Amino acid sequence: MKLSVFAIILLALFSACSDNKAVKKSTEPNTFYYQAYHYDDHGLQDSAFLFFSKAKDVFSQRGDSLGIGKCLLNMAIISNSRGDYFGAQELSLSAIPFFRPHNLKEHPYLQSNYNNLGMVSYNLLDFRQAITFYNIAKKYTLDAAGLLILNNNIANAYRRLGEFDKAIKIYSIILSQKLSEKEWSRTLSNFAYTKWQQNRKYDASNELFRALKVRKHIADLQGQISSYTFLTDFYSLTQPGLAKYYAKEMYNVAEKINNPNDKLEALQRLVRLSAENQSKQYFNVHQILNDSLQTARNAAKNQFALIRYESEKSKADNLRLQQENTEKTYQVNKQKTVTYLLSFLFVLFTLIGLYLSKKRKERLELTAQNRIKEGQLKTSKKVHDVVANGLYRVMTEIENQSGIGKEEILDRLDGMYQKSRDISYEVELPQAQDYHKKINSLLKIFESERVHITIEGNTQNLWEGISASVEHELEHILQEFMVNMDKHSQASHVSVRFSRQGDRLAISYHDDGIGVSDKINYGNGLKNTGNRIKNIQGEIIFGTKSEKGLEINFSFPVSQQP
């Protein structure tokens, strides 16, 4: 039945969706991405930025989060290098959600992205924020070389903030490690320059020249520019002529690697260190270069902004076309869907109807079986109570009371016979007269020379308000206790105490027999007794499970429906 329902559901769903194509992640290479790297490696940053943007759109269509993040990161790095600092900041911040911090393979991209954010903040002169980003980048740095660069960047930011002690401490830690010639010369140069900035009487020349010598040896042109910058500043007050010489060297190397930013800084120093006529010439060159650089930066900003705009516009156009196509196909598929749905519902309700009909039939059969079983249990209980226990009761009475006559025995047996005839019928029980005497007689039947029975609290007032059905159940419960006592307990003294405890009637049974084992064997008698106790809402507690006797505490509410 269930398999049929699921089969129909699947058939309906596949039929309704037969015109839709599943979207799968493509395993084909993103050619735009590799073209972008090709352009970037050859210094064509404008083209690289454009193709990274196109690659990002392809990754977006494929649902490749990592690919999107890498494209945004590369676009941010290019924007920063071209002076579009705010654009770079926006792109790097946009890339963060696409990287997964818990995935170690993506940590290099997170490190690079936060380092780029630090560099952007540094270029925007927000040195405190730069330190924050550099520290975040350190969390995702997996190699010692990367940590050296980030620590150096943090120290530079502290130097720009004027917090020289913090900067010097970091430089000192870096210098204590095993470094490459490039790292060592860079850190030593920064360390010496910062020491001089902290104390203008500090002679940093020896360390600055040592760093410059290594940088020349390894042809580190960008590092040489940094050395010439520091030497220019160091000699600017004490030896202006020498400072001007190093400013010219700085300009020449910057021109060699076509670094306009460093050329501008060199020209600023030459303007300050040169005589008036020459200073004007340097100033004019500075203005022309600065205007050209600003124009190039603005052009790059506009171009990058246009590329981002075109990318967003293209996505919006694609989304609009998808919506239009969806609307067109909706009406075509709507009628099909309604037809399939109605067919499905018809079959489903038919199957549900058959299923419910079957369950109802099973339920009725189960109810009938339960009624038969319940009747059998009731009959079994009556047979046990009326015939078995009744017969045992008569036998006990004959055994314990030697003066009982033949007529009395016949009366007892006739009573049992009459009760046995009513076993299969539900007979309305009459209210017993002098019920306390009946209970007293029941208990005393089991008294003999071997067993002494003590009864306490069994007065007429005790049983006021007790219904006939409860009296009937209680009589058989006590009879079962006494039969089990006589058969199994080997007791010499039995006490049964009756009492009222609020709205409950309590019965305490105690004997000095052999007790019961930890594992009570619940035969028919005890099972019937348990059911009778449950019928009158009673509670029973076996107080002792040892060889010193048995204690049973039993109670039930006085006020209950008959």
Image: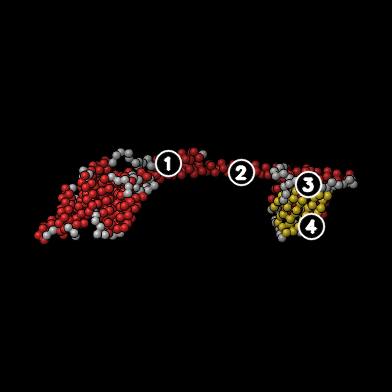
Which residue sits at x=30%, y=46%? 179
Number of the front mark, 3 or 4: 3
Q: In the structure shown, which secondary structural element does the residue marked by tag 1 occupy?
A: helix
Label 1, label 3: how far apart the Cα atoms are: 75 Å
The earlier-in-sequence mark between 3 and 4 is 4
Q: Residues within 10 Å of mark 4 (few under 14, many from 20)?
A: some
Q: Residues within 10 Å of mark 3 (few under 14, many from 20)?
A: some
Q: Residue at x 28, y 45 (%)?
A: 180
Is residue 204 rendered to the left or right of residue 144?
Answer: left
Residue at the spot of label 4: 457
Q: Residue 516: x and y, percent?
A: 73, 45
Of the residues tagged 4 and 1, which is closer to the observer? 4
The answer to whether the residue labelled 3 contacts the one labelled 4, judged by CB atoms less than 8 Å apart, is no
> Where in the figure is residue 329, as x and y percent of width and height?
33, 45
Which of disc 1 and disc 4 is earlier in sequence?
1
Q: Amino acid at mark 4?
A: Gly
Q: CA distance from mark 4 to mark 1?
A: 77 Å
> Label 4 to label 2, Cα distance in Å?
49 Å
Q: CA distance from mark 2 to mark 1?
A: 35 Å
Give me the residue at 10% from left, 58% from top.
278
| Nearest the eye: 42 or 529 | 42
Q: Which residue is mark 2?
A: 364
Mark 2 residue element: helix
Q: Are marks 3 and 2 in contact (CB under 8 Å)?
A: no
Labels 4 and 2: the sequence-earlier one? 2
Type of amino acid under label 2 = Leu
Q: Nearer the viewer, residue 185 or 291?
A: 185
> Who comes first in sequence, dot 2 or dot 1?
1
Circle 3 residue:
513
Residue 512 in sight in this render: yes
Q: Which residue is mark 1?
A: 12
